[in-house]
Image (cartoon, grey):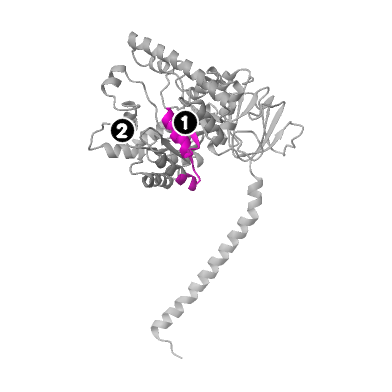
Amino acid sequence: MQIPAQQGSEFIAEEPLRRVRRGTTLWVLLIVALASTAQPDAQSAAPVALVKAGRLLDPRTGNVLAPAAVLIEGDKIKQVGSSSQIRVPAGAKIIDLGAATLLPGLIDGHTHLFLNVIVLPEAEQDRHFNGLFAPELLLAVAESPTKRALMAAQSAREDLDSGITTVRNLGHSGIDGDTELRDAINAGRIPGPRILAAGRKLVARGAGYVRNLNPALAEAILQQEFLLLDGGPDRARQAVRQNVFQNVDVIKVTVEENLTVGELTAVVEEAHRQHLKVATHAVEITSIQTAIDAGADSIEHGNDATDEQLRQMRDKGIFLDLTPTFYDGGYLKLAEPVIVIPPAVRAEEASSAARSKKRYDQFVQRVLKSGVKFAMGTDMCWFHPGKTCGEATVATFVNLHKAGVPALEVIRAVTSNAAEMLGWADRIGTIEPGKFADLVAVAADPVADIGELERVRFVMKGGQVVRNGLSSH
């Protein structure tokens, strides 16, 4: 039978096409077969290391293992014990830290990597005051997002160098600064700690941040830094969803008297529906009660909490994230190296610092007595003359001990307790099999001298040595 020209051309074209398809299928099957046979080799090729040290501190119990060895495979801890208990595979890298004390990687539960605020002269602050952290915060918001990202990357590296292997970045990073920095670190493009990113901070309009802005620019400035909770519970839920779109790890809300329990409850419900925790900035009594009643996961700062509120937090399992940022004259330590402080202003600041120190000492004792679960963050956002971001952060950790918290409790607050507050207790916070190989080492006993946290000598994150100032072979 004669095939019409058009049908014949289609028939002739199908034969080479079938051959191409058959060839492609064979190649695909071959690639799949090779991949499946190569998979065990790839898994067994994960680098293995044994870290040996004189001591290992378990922050949860306070127990010390001496001597100690940690077997690491890839980025996870495989085994913990003494050297005699652990069978070391052939070819494993041995890292001998001598008599040092091993600790889990340190955790800053409250930081702001995208801010580096320099204290301005008193006259400039007074003449241009338009809200909390203004004009300093406004200067940061007005800067290029690219510049802020590069500065944040530097701060992240400095944190890691000081032994801080995980941070929770709670706002002030633009729309997607901290989520993108997190992803770049996770991808290995730049060094830094693990980041739980909050994206934009949720606030009710009129919160104590930037205000009285140029009407032509106000909305753009606010939307770059905040998600506004205007319009009741529905708007609150929408704000959470906007942050979820940016793939955040936690929701941060500033709670002041202009935010209702209903609005914050909507935030918490929507966040929990999305499997996210809610961290609430709450300082004074009314705001703290709003956060408690709404079922927040953590209360940041909480300095004015009453004994009854601490009890409620304990009973509800709400974490208190202590932030002794300006403890014992911290403001003057920041300001004196960079600006001239008039004698009268300095005297008033010194007097205020003494009063604040006394109040915080009393607050800490009430917290310890209450039994509330607490962790620690630094609220790091300031330029500390002569110190890196990491050095300033670990110095703030030590402030908590100066305020009356026992050294072991401070270590828990920045390791195991912080991991639980973040919802990552199954990944970090202790040195246990199955968790990330995030380790730091100090030369002496940090329980006897908490200042050892400021002298971290060895840092490992995910099985990779970041720095080693101790003996190794």
Residue 441 sits in which quadrant? top right
How far apart are the alpha carbons under marks 1 and 2? 26 Å
Residue 323 in the image, given as x and y percentages of width and height: 48, 26
Quick check: can you spot residue 97? yes
Total numbered labels? 2
Residue 132, compared with residue 88, is above or below; it is above
The verdict on residue 364 being magenta is no
* Residue topped by disc 2: 142
Name of the residue lying farthest toward the front: 308
Residue nearest the observer in this picture, 256 or 129: 256
Q: Could you tell me which secondary element the residue under label 2 belongs to?
A: helix
Specify which label sits upstream in the sequence, 1 or 2.
Answer: 2
Q: Amino acid at mark 1?
A: Glu
The percent position of residue 332, horizontal first and vertical second, equals: 40, 15
State the mark number for residue 190: none
Is residue 140 or residue 206 the one in the foreground? 206
- 348 to the left or right of 442: left
Task: From the viewer's perspective, tell me whether residue 26 is left or right of residue 64.
Answer: left
Secondary structure of the residue carrying tag 1 is strand
Q: Residue at x 23, y 34 (%)?
A: 214
| Image quadrant containing the C terminus | top right
Tell me the kind of residue under disc 2: Ala
Label 1 neighbourhood size at 10 Å, few (<14), some (14-19), many (20+)?
A: many
Question: Residue 155 occupies which quadrant of the picture?
Answer: top left
The residue at the far bottom in this view is: 1
* Residue 300 marker: 1
Residue interval drawn in magenta:
269-298
